[in-house]
Image: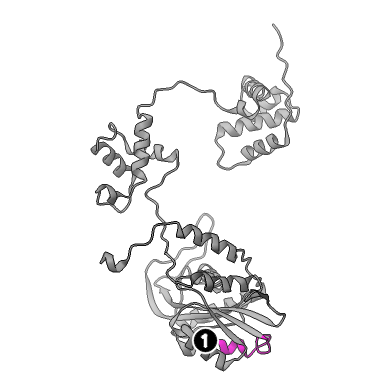
């Protein structure tokens, strides 16, 4: 009886990288993991018997996959085509299901906000577009493309007529330019905003720390102990927060007090220009606010973001960090405790602060606006009413 001689296995760099990814992937299917392990072990010169013993499979299994890989490469590790049961749902019916899923329910007269698998299956059957089809079959068909009509994203159409011009000024400042000229060594860029109405919620039962196999536990019920606002100024070039305050509410006076904290300290007091980026909140809206700031500090220049574009203000990133690391989960016995914690975190943040790696430029904005302009015009709310 002829003795089997193991086929030597050699790998290219690309094949080795792909197989290692399969062998180390946490979500790799077991069959793909096993085949990758067999081929990698064979490429290291191990015998089929040793590989089989290490992976707890038969030698025939090892021989099968190393032979297939030698003959066909990575394609040889795939299952061979099987006849199986013929598809009951035809290609036309599958296309019809996908086409229906890509329409809004209201367009077909169905009183739904968005499709789900069961609703799509019921509508396909009711409209006679296909034979009886189960929700699971609909979901499998949609997964092939993939189409997820039950998900949705919200977006807002730019309505500021000077959106591009205003946004470009801010994006150029982040890149170190103003009105086409590089910023000087004495220029500073400060991003200022407020995070209003931060609740101090005292939990009815004490929060317990995490334990093995158990997360931190926070009581669902709470008592409202008041609210305050967090005002902060972020230096775009250093990433530090030179000033922060926690007044009960926002307003012109708290905003000017915060700017006083900034402008009375160095390097801002002696800076050639301090560009103050703000949104269109009532405490610093319009030309009047810009004149008020300039009258108090002649080297301060207020720059407004376009309407509905607070995302251009980098201090919003700092506020998102505050939300994740301090405010949530919310468990504060008083607004005093909340204020002390917020200011203490700001001091801790400044110890390791670095500027944000802002990559979105005016050129990126131009491409975004071109895509948006290609969409249909928004429906006028006046006409719709």
Residue most toward the right? 45
Q: Position of residue 32 (x, y in %)?
A: 58, 33
Relative placement, left or right, of 334 versus 117 is: right
**Where does the image place residue 35, in percent across and percent down from the top left?**
62, 30
Q: Which residue occupies 52% across, 60% down?
A: 368
Magenta stretch: includes residue 78: no
Using the image, determine if residue 248 lies above or below residue 36.
below
Name the residue rendered at 38%, 30% in the picture: 91
Q: Residue at x 72, y 20 (%)?
A: 7
| Mark 1 Cα shell of 10 Å, populated few (<14), some (14-19), many (≥20) | some
Left or right of residue 47, residue 195 in this image: left
In percent of width and height, residue 176 lies at 66, 73
The residue lying toward the viewer, choosing from 332 and 323, is: 323
Residue range in magenta is: 257-272
- Residues 255 and 364: in front is 364
The N terminus appears in which quarter of the rendering? top right
Q: Which residue is mark 1?
A: 290
């Amino acid at each position: 009886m002829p003795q089997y001689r193991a086929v030597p296995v050699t790998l290219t760099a690309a094949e080795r990288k792909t197989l290692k990814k399969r062998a180390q992937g946490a979500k790799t299917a077991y069959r793909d993991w096993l085949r990758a392990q067999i081929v990698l072990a064979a490429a290291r010169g191990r015998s089929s018997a040793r590989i089989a013993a290490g992976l707890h499979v038969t030698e025939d299994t090892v021989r099968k996959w190393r032979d297939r890989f030698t003959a066909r490469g990575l394609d040889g590790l795939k299952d061979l085509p099987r006849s199986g049961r013929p598809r009951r749902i035809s290609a036309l019916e599958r296309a019809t299901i996908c086409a229906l899923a890509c329409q809004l329910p209201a367009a077909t007269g169905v009183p739904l906000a968005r499709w789900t698998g069961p609703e799509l299956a019921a509508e396909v059957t009711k409209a006679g577009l296909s034979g009886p089809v189960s929700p699971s079959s609909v979901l499998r068909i949609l997964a092939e493309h993939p189409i997820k009509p039950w998900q949705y994203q919200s977006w807002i159409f730019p309505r500021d007529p000077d959106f591009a011009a205003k946004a470009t000024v801010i994006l150029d400042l982040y890149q170190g330019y103003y009105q086409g000229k590089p910023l000087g060594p004495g220029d500073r860029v400060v991003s200022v905003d407020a995070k209003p109405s931060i609740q101090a919620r005292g939990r009815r039962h004490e929060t317990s720390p995490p334990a093995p196999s158990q997360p931190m536990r926070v009581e669902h019920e709470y008592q409202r102990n008041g609210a305050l606002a967090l005002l902060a100024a972020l230096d775009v070039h250093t990433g530090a927060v030179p000033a922060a305050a926690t007044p009960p509410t926002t307003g012109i006076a708290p905003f000017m007090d915060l700017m006083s904290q900034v402008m009375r300290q160095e390097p801002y007091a002696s800076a050639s220009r301090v560009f103050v980026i703000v949104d269109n909140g009532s405490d610093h809206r319009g030309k009047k606010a810009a004149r008020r700031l300039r009258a108090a500090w002649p080297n301060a220049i207020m720059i407004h973001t376009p309407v509905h574009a607070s995302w251009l203000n980098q201090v919003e990133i700092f506020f998102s960090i505050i939300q994740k690391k301090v405010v949530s989960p919310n468990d504060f016995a008083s607004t005093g405790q909340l204020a002390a914690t917020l200011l203490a975190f700001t001091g801790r943040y400044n110890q390791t602060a670095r500027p944000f790696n802002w990559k979105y430029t005016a050129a990126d904005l131009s491409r975004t606006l071109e895509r948006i302009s290609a969409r249909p015009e928004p429906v006028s709310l006046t006409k719709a009413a």
